[in-house]
Image (cartoon, rainbow, N blue to C red):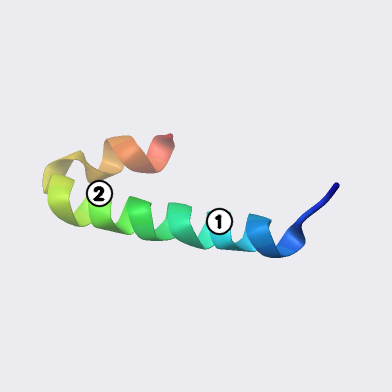
Amino acid sequence: MDHPRQEKVIQMTNCLVKRRVTQIGGLQSDGYDAT
């Protein structure tokens, strides 16, 4: 069963996590972008 809404939420969460990691990591942001 497909849950497009859930998938959207997951994508948004991943974006927020990446942003937060980038802010916390600072210099490590480049490494996380590749993942």
Number of dots carrying numbers: 2
Looking at the image, the residue that sits furthest to the front is 1
Q: Compute the Cα span from label 2 to label 1.
A: 15 Å
What SS does tag 1 mark?
A: helix
Quadrant where the C terminus lies? top left
Q: Which mark is residue 11?
A: 1
Going from N to C along the chain, the mark reached first, 2 or 1, is 1
Task: Identify residue type, mark 1.
Answer: Gln
> Residue 33 at what x, y percent from top left?
38, 43
> Residue 29 at what x, y percent from top left?
24, 45
Identify the residue position indicated by label 2 in the image: 21
> Residue 32 at what x, y percent from top left?
33, 39
Q: Is residue 31 left or right of residue 25?
A: right
> Residue 3 at what x, y percent from top left?
76, 56
Task: Identify residue type, mark 2.
Answer: Val
14 in relation to 16, above or below: above
